[in-house]
Image: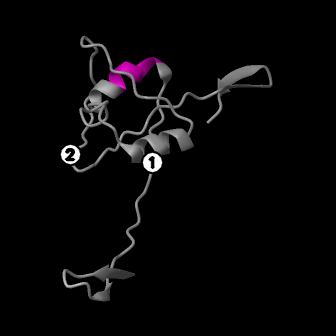
Amino acid sequence: MNLPFTDADGNKGNQIIYGMLEEIKLFRYVFPKEHLSAITKSLGLPSSRYSKFNAQAILMRKAMNAKKIPTPPKDTKTFPIFKDDVAIKEIGIKEDVGVEEFGFNHEGL
């Protein structure tokens, strides 16, 4: 990328800036609705940084048509989830719509 600049003496120039594109992957975690509190507390969601203004998360939440992650009650039990080597960027939650086929109701993943 070529970045034009003006130095302190008023001389104009161009500075070449080298960069790199890095691939990021987005996964979603699907679980039963009745375990929302236990899963969010087990994963440590929402974290303290989630409540701060984060334009990237807000735009992604809006694009995915998701809602903010609710804070679980303090007395919620947790599951043993090992997430030591995983970075979790919380965006939001999205509820599935119910689908009826052949007389049966199921989630529409």
Q: Which residue is mark 2?
A: 84
- Horizontal side, residue 36 vs residue 14: left or right: right
- The answer to whether residue 17 is visible is no
- The answer to whether residue 58 is visible is yes
Foreground residue, 100 or 19? 19
Determine the secondary structure under disc 2.
loop
What label does residue 12 carry, if any?
A: none
Determine the secondary structure under disc 1.
loop
Q: Which quadrant is home to the N terminus?
A: bottom left
- Horizontal side, residue 96 vs residue 87: left or right: right
Foreground residue, 54 or 22? 54
Residue drawn 27% across and 49% down? 86
Type of residue at label 1?
A: Phe
What label does residue 27 carry, if any?
A: 1
Foreground residue, 47 or 28? 47
Q: Residue furthest top?
A: 75
Q: Which quadrant is home to the C terminus?
A: top right
Could you say where residue 65 lies in the image, as x and y percent from the top left? 57, 36
Magenta includes 36?
A: yes
